[in-house]
Amino acid sequence: MDDVLVVGGGPAGLLSAWLARQGGAKVRLVAAGIGSTHIMPGWLGIANAAAEEGAQGDDLPAGIAALAGEHPGHPYAVAGLDALRAGIAALQEICEASGLRYRGGLERNMRLPTALGAALPAAYAPESFVAGDLNGGGAMLIAGPAGWRDFHPALIAGNLARQGFAAEPFAFDLPEIHAVKFDNLGTGLARLFDRPDVRERVGKQIAAHLNGAARVGLPAVLGLDAYPAAWQHLQELIGVPVFEIPTLPPSVPGIRLFNAFKGALTRARVPLLFNMPVARGLVDGRRVTGIAVTNVVRETIYRGQHLILATGGLYGGGITSDPAGALSEVVLGLPVHFSQPFAAWFGQALLGADHPIHQAGILVNREMQPVDRAGGEPLYDNVRVAGRLVAGYNGVSEGSTEGAWLATAARAVSSLLA
Amino acid sequence: MSEEYDVLVIGGGATGGGAAFDLALRGLRVALIERHDLTDGTSGRYHGLLHSGGRYAVRDPESARECIEENSILRRIVPHAIEDTGGFFISTPQDDPEFADKWLAACRACGIEAEELPVAQLLSEEPHLNPKTSRAFRVPDASCDSFDVLTALGAAVQAHGGTVLTYHEVVDLHVDAGRVTGATVRNKRTGGERRLAAPMVINAAGAWAGQIAGMAGCPVTVRPSKGTMVAMAYRFVNTIINRCHMPGDGDILVPVGTVAVIGTTSVNVADPNDTSVEAWEVRKMLDEGEIMVPGFSQARALRAWAGVRPLYEEGGDASGREAKRTFAVLDHEQRDGVRGLVTVVGGKFTTYRMMAERAADVAARQLGVTRPCTTKETVLADARHPFTGAKPHWLGHRLDHLERAERPGQLICECELVTRADIEEAVRLHPDPVAPWVLDDLRRDLRLGMGPCQGGFCGVRAAGILHELGEVDAAQANAALADFAQRRWKGQRPLLWGQNLRQALLDEHIYRDILGLDRLLVHGGEAADG
C-alpha cells in the first residue's frame, strides 16, 4: 500500500511524485509511457505578456493576472498563483541537482528565438538558452551543422533579420552526421556534443567565423550526459555567449528535464513504472482504493491512499475521442467537461485559430478534486487531477503550457498533504 | 509582344496533359496552361482506380467499353504509374446476389473479362473482407497514380519541344472575326500577364470548361459533381474492391501505396471550386467501408478530400449518378460558329488518353496536320524514379533503394521515405522555375507529407531546404510552410478523433509552440502579400 499513486509520466506526474515524496509520502508512479517532456521546447511558458512588443511594454504579471482573473475555471484561478510559484521553485530545485539551471522570473518574459527564427515568450529557460533573449543582446551568429534537416541557419537568421534582429548564418562541418544513414535526430547530435573532440572541432570553426557577432545560437543539442559542461566548454572555445535553440522532437532540453526528474525521483526512492498503462481504477464509494495495470499474464493491482491523475488529457491519451464526438477519461471514467459538438472542436484554420478542443478536460475544485460541475461535491475524495487533463485552458494560445502543469501539480500535492 | 504556338491546351489535368502530349508527338508547338500545379484539379483528387469498366457495365456500357479499352492501353504506356492490383466485385449481404448475373452478362457484352471465383478463395486472398460475402468476381482493375502520370506527361511535352506553364491562369481568350487567335494568361506568382498567340485552343479545363468556353462566347454547361474520399491509414486489401450493385456512395476501396482509399459521394455543386468535405460524407464512407471490411471504421482515418467530376451531356441534363461517364468533344466552329476552339469534357481519368486523342484529332484536322495520333504506342518514361522496377508504388522499393545506397542522404519525410536528394532533384525537374515555393507541388511529386504526420515534421524541413537552395527567401519560406500546413489541415480536420486528433495536436504544437510560425506570419505580413 502506497500513500500516493501517481498515474502519468509527463511533467505534471513527475513533479507531483517528487513533491509528494518531499512531503514525506510513500509514492509510486505508474505511466503508460514517456510524456510530453520529450516534445517540449524546454523553456517554461507561463503566459503571453499583456504587451509583448519590446522590453518596455512587456508585462508578464498582467498577463498572468488576466488568465487567473478573467477566467474563473482557469488552472491559475483554481490552483492559485502560490501554487504556480511553488511549482517553479520545486522544478528549479530538482533540476539544479542535475546541473540543469532554470533562469528567469515572473516579472517579464524573455523572447527566445525558435528554429524558424520567430521570437517566443518564456518566463524561465535553461541557462544555456538565456543569451538568446531578443529583449537585449548584440548581433547573432546562427550556426548549425551543414546539411542537418532540423536546423536551417540561413532561414533562422533570415527571419530574425526581417524582425530587426542582427543575425548571420553559418553552417559548420560535422561529418559524423552523414555517417548516420537515416534518422539524424537531435539526440544523436547531442551525444556527439558529449565528446570533447567534436566540440573542439566545431568551436574552432565557429570562432573563425564570428565576424564580430556578440553571441552564437546553436541547435539545442549541446550535450546530453555532458550537459551543461558541453555547453560551457563550447562557449569558452568560441569566446562569446552561446545559446541553444530548441528543434523538432525528440527534444534534447526536454530529455534533460526528464533525466533530472528521473534522477531526483530515483534518489528519493520513488518507484517509476513506465510502459504500464492503467486499465482502470478500483473504486469504493467516493474513494479510489487502487489502480489495475494489465500485463501479458495478469492484472496487477496497486493500492494507495491517494491518487493523482496526470494522464495528459487528449494530448497524452488520458482522454480518448471517437468519431461520434464522445470524449472519455480512461482511468476512472470521469466526466469530461466540454460542451462543443464534434464539428466545432477545431477551427477551419490550423494557425491563428484558438481550437476550442483545448478547453476539454476534467473540471476540478480548488483542491484539484474532480467535480461534475462548478461548485459540485468531489466525485472522489482522494483523487487529485493535474496537468493537461485539467479543463479550462488553452496552453498554446495563452502561452501557459508549462505554467499550467507547474501550478496544478503543486496544488494537487499541497491539497492532498494538507 | 506575343509568343506564338500552334496549339494552346488549357487545363493541366490528365486530359489536357494527354492532349498536349498527343499534339507535341504530331510535331506541333504546344503550350500546356494550368492555373495551379499539374493535377491540382480533379485528376489529382480521385481515388486512384484504373477502371476495368465493370462499374459502368450495366448502366453505362459505352463508358464501360471505353474504360476496358483504355485500361489495357494505359498498362502498356504508363506502366510505372500503375500497380496491377487486379479488382474484385463482391456481393455483400447488402447487395442483391441476383444483380451479379445481370452484371456478369453486361461485362461480357462490353468485353470485360470477369470471372467468378469461390468466396473461400476470395477470403483467402483478401481475409479482411466481409466473410458473409455471397459472390465474388475478378476483373482487371488496377491502381493508378495520377501524379506520376501527369509528371511523365509534363516532362514528355517538354522533351518534345512543348511548353508547360503551371501557375498561369487564362484570363481571356482572343476572338477575332469568329476565330480564336490566342489567350492572355496571368502568372499567379508575379501577376504579370502575357499574350499567347495560337490558331487553335483546346479547352480541357474539366469542371471549369464552361468558364473557359464562355470567354469565347460559347455556352457549355458542365454539371460539377463533388465526390468525397477518405484515405485510411491501413492497406486493408491488396486488390481493388467494388460492391457488385448499381454504383453508389462509398462502394469502391482502392489500395494505394501504404493506404486504402474509400470513395466516393456524389453531390451536385454549383461551384467547381467547392471541394469541401462534410461530416455526413465522412460518416457515410466509414459506414459503407464497414460493409466491405468489418471493423473498417475503427481504423485510423488519415485524410479526407473531394474532387469535382466534370459531368457533361450534350443536349442532356442528367446529373450525379444518373449522368453518363462518357465524354464529349465539342468543335465550336460547327457548334457555335467560333473557329479554332475545341472543348473536351466529361469522361474519366481512365479514358483520358482517348479523350485527348479525339480532341487532338479535331484540332489537327482544322490545322491541316495529317500525322496520326501515336499515343497508343508511345511509352511514357518515368522521369523521376528510373531506379524503380515494376511496382514503383510499393514503399519497399524506396526503402530498398535507400538501404542499398551508399549515402542516401537524410530522410526529410520519414512516413513516405523522401530524402533531401529527392527534394533537390524534384526542385530541379519542376516544370515551372518560379513555382517550387508551393510545397504542395513537392507533395504531388514525392508524396511529401502524405503519411500519418501530414507534414508536421517534413514541412519545415522542406521549407528550410528550399530556402537553402535559394528558391525562396525567408518570407516566402514562411508563407510556403503555412500554406502547406493549412492545405494538409483541410484534409485532416474532418477526421480529428482518436489518434488522428492527437497527431493534430502534436502538429499544432510543432508549428506554434516550437517554431512560432504563426507569429512570423503576423510579423512579416506574408498573409497579405503571399
Image (cartoon, coloured by chain):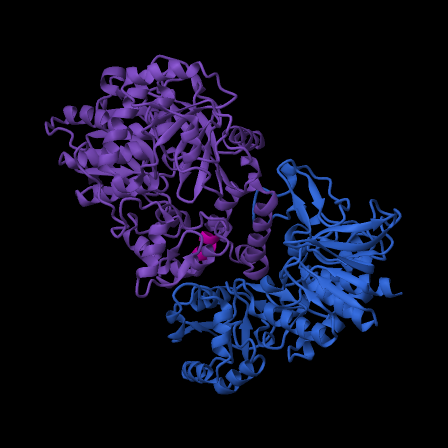
Q: Determine the main secondary structure of the stretch shown in magenta.
A: helix
Give coordinates of residue B365: x percent, y percent: 15, 24
Residue at 64%, 80% (x, y): give it: A99
Letter of the purple chain: B
Give coordinates of residue B323: x percent, y percent: 40, 17
Letter of the blue chain: A
Reply above or below: A31 against B213: below
Q: Is residue A48 visible?
A: no
Q: Tell me which segment is drawn in magenta.
A: B476-481
Reply above or below: B151 against A268: above
Magenta stretch holds residue B480? yes
- Quadrant position of the C terminus of chain A in the picture: bottom right
Reply above or below: A320 against B313: below
Give coordinates of residue B502: x percent, y percent: 60, 50
Magenta stretch holds residue A49? no
In the image: residue A188, left or right of residue B506: left
Give coordinates of residue A218: x percent, y percent: 50, 73
- Quadrant position of the N terminus of chain A in the picture: bottom right
Q: Nearer the viewer, residue B273 or A55?
A: B273
